[in-house]
Structure formats: structure tokens, C-alpha cells
Image: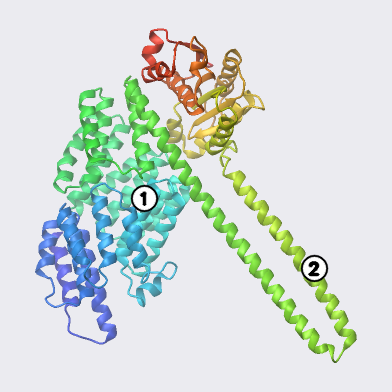
């Protein structure tokens, strides 16, 4: 494998070192040199020392500053592949003094940040701003053939930008970045980059639940990767991710097995270790926990040898999950401490939330409820931020569409108005020749102007209606048509302004669908959507028309009932449990029996504290959340409500919330427990 690569490199170098030639030949030489540098940097991912030696040995003696910038970027990337981040950063500084080197410097620095597991999106966006001069969006063919676009650098900047957008939940923006990267790769005839762009697109589309489109992208990626073992291995890994998110565990396992075989054939140890770290997760899902540990421990030293902190952190997380499931809690905490040493990009909301969900479920299954609760709350907070950014991305896309349509209508109306004015001028010229005809034409022109003004008013009315619709949509959940978190926050803020000194009053009920992850994994996301929609409908039917039903996020719902006393609230919670769990829910994968866990409380909290127990609405949500988790930890398919709290002041109340189980045990909190329908 290595001998074949070196032969290929020598062939490319021979082309790159050919004597001066006409313009077409010079362009051919430039393309050959860029192909050479791309090959060296890609192979350096798995063999950095050999590729660094080859790059140094073939370094041209006499180069223009612009040409040297391309070679310096290649050197920086090869150093980075070997984990030499400080040396790579020194190259990034050196690039700043070269023609065409500034934007490449930002790309290299972004890649360094990514390798260190730190935020890279802002640096990538900065690089892209400069690269856009030679790589304008929407005109990729001209960019490559005429403007001398640096395809590889622009592609990497777009990949890093997509990674940040995806991690923040802005999936529409992430898809747009990848489609632009794909267009660049095609224009540059780089099948390796095209294959990877197709594969990453598949992952984004599957996250947006466009399963057929995702699999079409995988097929396109495999076609582009044909004959390229490394690209094929990476595409098969993307395929495994798509199948896993679609709930096809067998397909995911098969794709990952093929990816590992291809990586071994390509003699790619670094890539193999990354795939093995992914395999740890797959083995855990199959219940093969000891095999998962062995596989992870085999991959760890390779990732450490390549100083790949990004994937090493992910592997420590997976090993922690395996130890938890094996009830090896001390080993799990040691692995999690190592994860903490790496830090986490605060902007990566989606991956971090997914990690926290896995930790929460694993700790809960192992009976470690304190750790489970901490992970549960952290995951919920991140999901809320992610959902908000995804919603903002979707609304921005809708706004752009409506603005574009409005601008087009304005242009059409202006054009018609201009035509009418031209007609009027023509009518005046003819007035000296045909007075009667002029009168008729002026009358016609007036009618047309009136019609145009009427159409303008109607268009403005439609635009205003669309804007009102957008505002309404921003406060509704698109799947269930229930109120969303944003609407609930607006209602709470309004009530807080109206009742400043009295604290939050009313009742809250938090509802969580039991084992919803299993529904998605085993029956697919279409079945999961059907369950969420029907549960939302059943909750709405079980409460009063004056109560506010909110899709809180994912499989969670919240009900706000103004002025609902505790006894009535318990009856309502019982109705909700019975309504959700009594009858199976029809889904595309057949009928499914679904149950839910419910936490409820009426505020102000009852007890001896009286007015001292008045809370802000955010604190009230935390209390409802706490009893929901109590219901989940005690077996699910039940409701747990707060009957009374014995606390003399706010400090005592906060202390109770910190160790809720102990407070319940010592009688400081009295609970109401309702069992859901059985069988």
C-alpha cells in the first residue's frame, strides 16, 4: 500500500516539476501540484512521519510567495496529523506573511482548534470570508476554472462551519454549508472530498428525519468513493450513523464492520482506531459490554499516539458508559474525570446533550439516581438551547423566502407602474393628433393605476398576514401544534409582571413519555412522531380548555393550570395517566402501548412556611421537574405530586431541593403517588 502511494506521489511530483510551458500546461502543472499536496495531507492522517519526510524531501527550491503558501499549509496539516499542534501553529503564523497565506492561516488554526477539541467555527467562518473572493458561492465552476479557488481550503472551512452549525442544532444551515462544499468538490473534480460531503449530508438529512434522502446521499457517496479505500471506509461509517439514527441496528453494525475492513485494507491505523471507538458504542447497544471495553482499550493507545484529543475524549465517554452498565462505578467516574480534563466546546449543544442523555439513562438503569438526575437536568437545558437554535434557523429560512417573495412583488408592481407611466407619456404625445382617443386612453390608464394600487394593497395585506403567521408559528410546536417553550416563557413573564410580590400561583404538571428512545430506535422516527402527536392530543383532552399545554422539548410536555388546588390537580394527573396508557397508539409500525411519568405540584407549596414558600415560576418548574424524575426513578408509569413541604424559609426550601430523596425520607416533603394503568 505504501509503495503504491509513493509511486503515485513521485508521478505527481514529476508533473509538478516539469519545465515552463504555455498557459494550459502551467495550469496542468498547478493542478498536479495541488493534487500531490492533497494526497500527502490525506495520507498523513495515518502516516504523518513518512509524509512529512516526503514533503521535506520534495520541497521546491525556488517558489513564489503564493505557491509557497500552499506548500506551507500542507506542512502545517501534516504536522497537525502527527499531533504536533504547536509546530502547526508556528506554520500558521508563518503563513501570515505570504501572499494568499492569511486565509490559509485561519483554516490551519481552525483545524488545530478542532484537533484540540475546541471551538473552530468562528475561525473557519473568518477564513471563508477571505476565501470567498476566489470561491464565490453559487459560481463554483468559474471559481475553480477562472478565479483560482483553493478548493481544499474552502472545503475544510465549510466542513468546520457545518460541524459548528450541526452541533448547535442549526441543521438547515449545516445542510446549506455541506451542499456548497459538495459543489466545490465537484467543480474541482475531487472525488474524495465529494464522497465525504455526500456522507456528511446523509447524517444531517437523517437528523432532520429525511431517511430516503439520506440513503440517496450514501449511495452517491459510495459511487464517488469507488477505488478509494479510505473514502469508502469513511462513507461506510457515515452509513452506520444513518442506519443507527433510523433504528436499524443490524444495518448500522454491518456498515461499521465493512468500514473497519476497508480501513484495515488501506493500512490506516488512525482511522481504524476512530472506527473502533464507534464500535464500542455499537457493542454496548448489543449488550456485549466486556467486548466493548476490550475494543475501546485496544483503540485508546492509538488515539493517544496520534494525539487525537477529539476522538480520545469521545472514547473515554463510551468507556465510562460501559463501566456504568457493568456497575464498575469507580472506573466509570475515573473515565468521566478524564473526559472532564479535555473540556467541552460550549457551542456543541447537540453532541453534548446526546452524551448527557446516555449518561442519565445509564446511571438510572444502574440505580445511581443522584448522578442520573444531574445529567438529566443538564441534558434538558442543552436540548432547550438546541431546539431554539434549530427553530430560529427554520424561521430565518422562512423569513428569507417571504422577504424574497415580497421583494419580487414590489419589483413587479414597480415595473407595472413604470409601464403605466410610459403609456401616459405616449398618450400625451398623441394628444395633439387625436383628442378623443387621448381621453379614452387616460381613462384606461386611470383604471389600470387603480387596479395596480388595489393589487399593491392586497399584496401588502398578504405580506402582513404572512408576518403575523410567522410570529404565531414561532410560538407553536410544528409537530403537535401545541404551544412551545417560547410561548410558555412569554406567558410566565407576563404573569410575573402582573404579580410581582405574590410569586408564582397555579399548578404545573410535567409529563415524560416512558422509554421513548426505544420507540425511535426499534420502530423508527415516524412512529416516534406519531406517538408524540397522539400523546399531546390525549393530554389536551384530559385537561381544561383554560389550561395551557406545552410541548416542553423532545418527549416532554408541560401543563400550566391557573388556580388549580392540589386535590383537583391529582385528579387531573390521574386522567392524564389513564388517557395516555389505557389504549395503544396507532403508528406506521403498528399499535404501541405507551405509558408516561407525571410530576405535579400546586403553588404556593402547602406547609407551615406560608408566604415564605412563594417561588418564582422558574423555581416552580424545577420542583415539578424534581417530582417527575422521582416518578421516573421509582419505576415510571406513575404520577408523583407534592402534597406539602415543611420549610420555614427560602433557604430551607433550596436545601430540600438539593437532597430531595432525604427530605422525603425525613418527612419534610409529603408526596402523592398515583399508579398508571397496568397491562
- Mark 2, residue position: 450
Q: Is residue 662 above or below residue 297?
A: above
Q: Residue furthest right?
A: 436
Side (left or right) of 449 relative to 478: right
Indicate left or right for 627 with 565 as reference: left
**In the displayed structure, would residue 554 be above or below residue 190?**
above
At a point 16% along the width and 73% down the height, the residue shown is 13
Q: Quarter of the image for the N terminus: give it.
A: bottom left
Is residue 407 shown to the viewer in this render? yes
Q: How does the figure colour the protein chain or chains?
A: rainbow
**Apparent side of residue 300 relative to residue 232 in the rendered image (left or right):** left
Residue 316 placement (x, y as % from top left): 23, 36
User: What is the secondary structure assignment of the residue under circle 1?
Assistant: helix
**Relative horizontal placement of residue 18, taking residue 183 as reference (left or right):** left
Q: Secondary structure at mark 2?
A: helix
Please rate how many residues cluster around mark 2, counting C-alpha atoms within 10 Å: few if below 14, some from 14 to 19, many from 20.
few
Which residue is at the front of the view, 409 or 193?
Answer: 409
| Quadrant of res 537 | top right
Determine contact: label 1, label 2, CB under 8 Å. no
State the image coordinates of residue 423 (x, y, percent, origin top left): 76, 81
Farthest-out residue, front: 501
Tell me if residue 232 comes above or below residue 613 in the rendering.
below
- At 37% from the left and 64% from the top, the residue drawn is 129
Residue 545, image x, y percentages:
67, 27
Identify the residue at horizontal 27%, vertical 35% (top origin): 318
229 or 467: nearer the viewer: 467
Is any atom of residue 47 visible in this view? Answer: no
Dot 1 or dot 2: first in sequence order is: 1
Q: Nearer the viewer, residue 17 or 468?
A: 468
Which residue is disc 1 drawn over?
164
Q: Tell me what residue is drawn at x 43 percent, y 37 percent.
A: 383
Amino acid at each position: 500500500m505504501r509503495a503504491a502511494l509513493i509511486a503515485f506521489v513521485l508521478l505527481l511530483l514529476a508533473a509538478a516539476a516539469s519545465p515552463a510551458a504555455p498557459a494550459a500546461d502551467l495550469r496542468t502543472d498547478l493542478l498536479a501540484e495541488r493534487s500531490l499536496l492533497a494526497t500527502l495531507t490525506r495520507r498523513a492522517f495515518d502516516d504523518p512521519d513518512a509524509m512529512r519526510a516526503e514533503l521535506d524531501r520534495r520541497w521546491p527550491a525556488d517558489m513564489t510567495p503564493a505557491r509557497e503558501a500552499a506548500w506551507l499549509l500542507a506542512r502545517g496539516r501534516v504536522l497537525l496529523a502527527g499531533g504536533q499542534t504547536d509546530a502547526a501553529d508556528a506554520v500558521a503564523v508563518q503563513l501570515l506573511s505570504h501572499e494568499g497565506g492569511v486565509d490559509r492561516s485561519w483554516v490551519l488554526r481552525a483545524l488545530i482548534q478542532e484537533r484540540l477539541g475546541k471551538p473552530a467555527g468562528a475561525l473557519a467562518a473568518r477564513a471563508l470570508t477571505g476565501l470567498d473572493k476566489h470561491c464565490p458561492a453559487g459560481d463554483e465552476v468559474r471559481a475553480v476554472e477562472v478565479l483560482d479557488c483553493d478548493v481544499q481550503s474552502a472545503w475544510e472551512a465549510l466542513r468546520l462551519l457545518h460541524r459548528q452549525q450541526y452541533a448547535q442544532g442549526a441543521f438547515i444551515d449545516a445542510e446549506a454549508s455541506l451542499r456548497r462544499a459538495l459543489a466545490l468538490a465537484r467543480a474541482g473534480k475531487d472525488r474524495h472530498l465529494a464522497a465525504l460531503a455526500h456522507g456528511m449530508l446523509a447524517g444531517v438529512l437523517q437528523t432532520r428525519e429525511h431517511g430516503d434522502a439520506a440513503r440517496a446521499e450514501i449511495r452517491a457517496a459510495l459511487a464517488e468513493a469507488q477505488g478509494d479505500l479510505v473514502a469508502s471506509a469513511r462513507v461506510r461509517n457515515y452509513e452506520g450513523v444513518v442506519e443507527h439514527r433510523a433504528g436499524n441496528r443490524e444495518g448500522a453494525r454491518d456498515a461499521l464492520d465493512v468500514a473497519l475492513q476497508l480501513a484495515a485494507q488501506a493500512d490506516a491505523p488512525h482511522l481504524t482506531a476512530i472506527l473502533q471507538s464507534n464500535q464500542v458504542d455499537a457493542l454496548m447497544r448489543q449488550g456485549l459490554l466486556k467486548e466493548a471495553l476490550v475494543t475501546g482499550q485496544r483503540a485508546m493507545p492509538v488515539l493517544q499516539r496520534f494525539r487525537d484529543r477529539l476522538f480520545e475524549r469521545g472514547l473515554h465517554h463510551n468507556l465510562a458508559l460501559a463501566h456504568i452498565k457493568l456497575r464498575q462505578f469507580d472506573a466509570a467516574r475515573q473515565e468521566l474525570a478524564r473526559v472532564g480534563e479535555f473540556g467541552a466546546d460550549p457551542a456543541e449543544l447537540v453532541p453534548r446533550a446526546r452524551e448527557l442523555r446516555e449518561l442519565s439513562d445509564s446511571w438510572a438503569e444502574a440505580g445511581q439516581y443522584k448522578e442520573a438526575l444531574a445529567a438529566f437536568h443538564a441534558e434538558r437545558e442543552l436540548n432547550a438551547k438546541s431546539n431554539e437554535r434549530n427553530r430560529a434557523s427554520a424561521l430565518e429560512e422562512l423569513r428569507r423566502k417571504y422577504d424574497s417573495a415580497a421583494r419580487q412583488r414590489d419589483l413587479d408592481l414597480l415595473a407595472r407602474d413604470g409601464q403605466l407611466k410610459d403609456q401616459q407619456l405616449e398618450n400625451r404625445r398623441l394628444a395633439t393628433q387625436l383628442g378623443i382617443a387621448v381621453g379614452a386612453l387616460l381613462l384606461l390608464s386611470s383604471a389600470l393605476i387603480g387596479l395596480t394600487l388595489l393589487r399593491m394593497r392586497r399584496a401588502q395585506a398578504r405580506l402582513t398576514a404572512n408576518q403575523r403567521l410567522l410570529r404565531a408559528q414561532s410560538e407553536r410546536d410544528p409537530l403537535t401544534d401545541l404551544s412551545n417553550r417560547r410561548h410558555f416563557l412569554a406567558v410566565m413573564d407576563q404573569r410575573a409582571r402582573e404579580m410581582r410580590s405574590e410569586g408564582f400561583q397555579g399548578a404545573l404538571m410535567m409529563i415524560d413519555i416512558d422509554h421513548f428512545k426505544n420507540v425511535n430506535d426499534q420502530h423508527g422516527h415516524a412512529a416516534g412522531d406519531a406517538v408524540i402527536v397522539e400523546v399531546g392530543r390525549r393530554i389536551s383532552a384530559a385537561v381544561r380548555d383554560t389550561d395551557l399545554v406545552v410541548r416542553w422539548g423532545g418527549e416532554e410536555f408541560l401543563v400550566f393550570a391557573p388556580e388549580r388546588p392540589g386535590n383537583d390537580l391529582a385528579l387531573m394527573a390521574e386522567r392524564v395517566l389513564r388517557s395516555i396508557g389505557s389504549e395503544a397508539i396507532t403508528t406506521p409500525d403498528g399499535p404501541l402501548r405507551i405509558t408516561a411519568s407525571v410530576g405535579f405540584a400546586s403553588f404556593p407549596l402547602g406547609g407551615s412556611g406560608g408566604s415564605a414558600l412563594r417561588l418564582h415560576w422558574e423555581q416552580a418548574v424545577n420542583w415539578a421537574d424534581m417530582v417527575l424524575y422521582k416518578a421516573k426513578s421509582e419505576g415510571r408509569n406513575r404520577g408523583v405530586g407534592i402534597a406539602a413541604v415543611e420549610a420555614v424559609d427560602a433557604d430551607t426550601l433550596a436545601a430540600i431541593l438539593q437532597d430531595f430523596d432525604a427530605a422525603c425520607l425525613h418527612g419534610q416533603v409529603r408526596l402523592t403517588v398515583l399508579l398508571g394503568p397496568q397491562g
